[in-house]
Image (tube, helix red, strand yellow):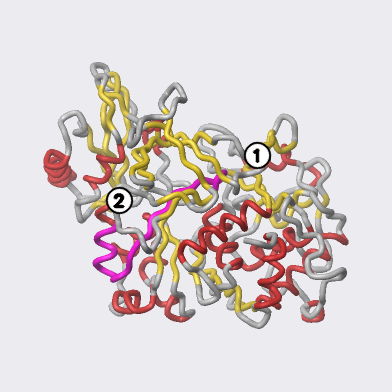
Amino acid sequence: MTTSLSDAIRAVFAARRDHVYLIDHTARREFTFGQWLDVTTALAAELARAGITKGDRVALLLPNSWELAAFYFACLGMGAVAMPLNPQTAADTRNYLLRNTGPRAIVGGADLDPAEVPGCIGLTCSLDIRPLKDASIVPAALLGARPAGGLLPALRDDNLFSITFTSGTTERPKGVAHYVSGLFGNAHAFNRLYGFDERTRIAHLFPMTYMAGFLNTLLSPFIAGGSTVLLGQFGPTTALDFWTPLRTHQINTLWVSPTMLSGVLKLDRDPAGRSWAAANIGTVCVGTAPLPYQLKADFEAAYGVRLYESYGSSELLYVTAMGPADPYVPGAVGRPVDGVTVRIVDQDGATVAAEGTGEILLQSRHAFAGYWDYAVGAVEPFGRDTWFPTGDAGKLVDGRLYITGRLKDLIIRGGANVSPRAIEEVLHRHPDVVAAAVVGVPDSFYGEDVLAVVQPVAMPADPAPFIKELQALCRKGLSDVEMPRRFELIAEMPRNANGKVLKTDLRAAFSKPR
């Protein structure tokens, strides 16, 4: 882009003023870009009157809603730092994060006492910011208010915009800080790859406190001049009637996880959904977890759409993506997006030979500002020229990145390396498998053995016949060393808010040596 990202944001507001940006399906609210600017400017003014200034952290403890989205943009406009926390976060983790990040204000979280957070003010201003109790938080008289000093005068590319938190399992979540330029620059690069523009209308189905529901489905459609429709967080009931709200709001773009695709494929009961999707859904982006080949093939055949897999992280955002012009190559997650460089290294940190497998290191001009240092109480800077270790194993072939698994997930069975992802791909070929996760568990002879945990469409009264079918499938598609020695059926996989399977929980549940 030849202009700054801040100028590009201002230009979107100006050029698209009378066009719809955000629809909240549940609250039945709709906002044009102009109305969105009015609402978020009014919120920013109220935050300022309550004592919030540029650089202050504002903790947001709100469910998916247009209100939460509005506070993101209010912080953006005034230079404050939005710090979203999933309202479902365990109380001890939530309280630890609040005490050790020092927010100047808390929005939502009605059960919290701001006095317990050093330096925090309890917001009780005229818009009833804390807590939000209804969808009419902005008086009609404020909707025509225009910002003083020009359009979003405090907005700068180098402003710290957000601190989001990773889904911690065995340790405290990491606070990942991002600049305005990193978030919007990365979104712009992704939009260019797919041709997203003012015609793009995307379905919002992810938790808004995580990157998939923040960058992917709020900021990306905004900077494209398109629109987003908040459909509520995805669940089994969503899958049963998935296409009706998409038809109602004329959605043409999806950003989904493999879990969502599997749910729709297994539970969809809309007879018109398949033909409607084929005629109206132009792009389906898939991320947050590996996309099994069989799931991709089955969904594309059923709904007449093409799935585009991507790869990224909370720290580096979009890293690679499969573009519309790229032919599908099994196992590949696309080419690096503009501004990203990929390097594959061995265990000693040396670059591996062409097409060799090793750890994936990344450089990106959209990289995060750094992690929040809980001990120091500030962001520990991350250099833009620093290589970021992903913890993922992969390879580069003809410019495409292949993910072969997580380094820590690698199973070493009797000295042989076993890739869980390769086994999971085979298990997903069974038509009655909703999800499969393969982990290493302690074994007195091999040191570590292969356990396959499978979630079937319905739990069988007698699991033995189903497990025999899985064993037969694995014998056809796997070598002897890859063959799972144990199969366990589970009614529902443990997952984090983004839909990723919590393998640490599975290991803990099934780690008795045999």
Residue type at mark 1 is Gly
Label 2 sits on a secondary structure element that is loop
Q: Quadrant of residue 468?
A: top left
Image-based side of 306 in relation to 41, left or right: left
Residue annotated with mark 2: 292
User: Residue drawn at (78%, 66%), measured in percent from left and top?
Assistant: 152
Q: Tell me whether the residue at label 2 lies in contact with that at label 1, contact meaning CB atoms closer than 8 angstroms.
A: no
**In this view of the protein, which residue sits in the foreground, 280 or 359?**
359
Q: Is residue 345 left or right of residue 455?
A: right
Residue 440, horizontal then vertical, whole percent: 32, 29
> Is residue 298 covered in magenta?
yes
The x, y position of residue 108, in whole percent, is 70, 57
Give the residue at x 66% y 43%.
369
> Mark 1: which secondary structure?
strand
- Badge 2, how many Cα within 10 Å: few under 14, some, many 20+? many
Task: Answer above or below: position of 454 versus 346.
Answer: below
Q: CA distance from mark 2 to mark 1?
A: 32 Å
The residue nearer to you, when weighing 104 against 281, is 281
Which quarter of the image is occupied by the C terminus? top left
Q: Which residue is mark 1?
A: 370
Which three-letter amino acid code belongs to the residue tagged 2?
A: Pro
User: How far from the left and from the top, in percent, is residue 229?
Assistant: 53, 72
